[in-house]
Image (cartoon, rainbow, N blue to C red):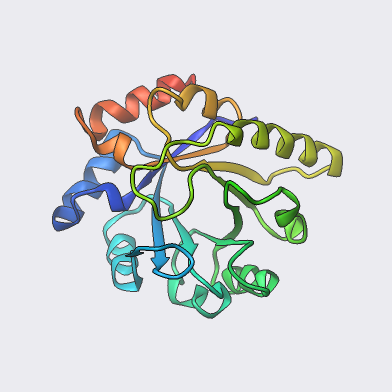
């Protein structure tokens, strides 16, 4: 497995100082920026939108990872042209293949996400057409939700499935409830770890990103 990357959730930043916050992430050594988009239907809150996406894209050179927690994502993917990665949920509608194809059409790498209660089989229909599988470790949209420990077993099974199917180069990402207490355990299994509030809290990105990388066994 390659070096574990840290993708930092932009919604945890002070959005009133977005340019400054993104600059802090770059300076502190974040690998990616992660932007959640929720429509109030698939995920209860209405958070993240195209305007915020465009602002983030304009203000950072870091790879931008857009996580669409929206119903019928195939209708919305094109609005996020310019993202490096676009991930859609297997549960969000009947046309996941079309959503994945749309992500690629607009120049992004495609990912498929699974909620905690969704079996790995939910990703298998598109597994050879995506570059990333995102295991969501909390129910989307519920602030303060705790990491679901069963996600670790699910990640191990996904690694086994990759090996069984001879799949190489597809990243395994884990998102939700990840902090410095569980970062090492998650980082052992994931190529990409997504964390937001734990990066911005207390000492801030400058110290917390170093601590995350140390937990992943990275030197810098």
Q: Identify the image quadrant of residue 87.
A: bottom right
- The vertical placement of 202 against 9, above or below, is above
- The vertical placement of 122 against 200, above or below, is below
**Camera-side residue of 83 and 165:** 165
Look at 34% across and 35% down and name the residue there: 29
Q: Quadrant of the C terminus?
A: top left
- The vertical placement of 115 against 68, above or below, is above
Look at 29% across and 66% down and name the residue there: 52
**Camera-side residue of 37 and 109:** 37
Q: Is residue 24 left or right of residue 106?
A: left
**Camera-side residue of 82 and 77:** 77
Look at 34% across and 42% down and name the residue there: 144
**Camera-side residue of 176 and 204:** 176
* Residue at the far bottom in the pictured view: 75
Look at 25% across and 38% down and name the residue there: 200
* Residue at the far left in the pictured view: 16
Residue 129 horizontal/vertical position (percent): 72, 60
Q: How many marks?
A: 0
Residue 5 horizontal/vertical position (percent): 48, 36
Residue 125 horizontal/vertical position (percent): 77, 60
Q: Is residue 24 left or right of residue 91?
A: left
Q: Quadrant of the N terminus?
A: top right
Residue 170 horizontal/vertical position (percent): 68, 46
């Amino acid at each position: 497995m390659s070096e574990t990357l840290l993708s930092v959730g932009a919604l945890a930043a002070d959005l009133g100082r977005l340019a400054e916050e993104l600059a802090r992430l770059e300076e502190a050594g974040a690998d990616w920026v992660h932007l959640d988009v929720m429509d109030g239907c698939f995920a209860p809150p209405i958070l993240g939108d195209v305007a915020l996406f465009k602002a983030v894209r304009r203000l950072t050179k870091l790879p931008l990872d857009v996580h669409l927690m929206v119903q019928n994502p195939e209708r919305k993917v094109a609005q996020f042209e310019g993202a490096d990665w676009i991930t859609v949920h297997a549960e969000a509608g009947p046309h996941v293949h079309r959503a994945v194809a749309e992500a690629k059409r607009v120049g992004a790498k495609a990912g498929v996400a699974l909620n905690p209660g969704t079996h790995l089989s939910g990703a298998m229909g598109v597994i050879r057409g995506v570059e990333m599988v995102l295991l969501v470790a909390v129910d989307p949209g519920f602030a303060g939700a705790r990491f679901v420990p069963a996600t670790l077993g699910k990640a191990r099974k996904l690694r086994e499935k990759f090996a069984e199917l001879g799949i190489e180069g597809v990243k395994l990402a884990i998102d939700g409830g990840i902090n410095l207490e569980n970062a090492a355990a998650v980082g052992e299994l994931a190529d990409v770890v997504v964390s937001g509030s734990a990066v911005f809290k207390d000492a801030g990105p400058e110290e917390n990103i170093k601590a995350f990388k140390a937990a992943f066994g990275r030197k810098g």
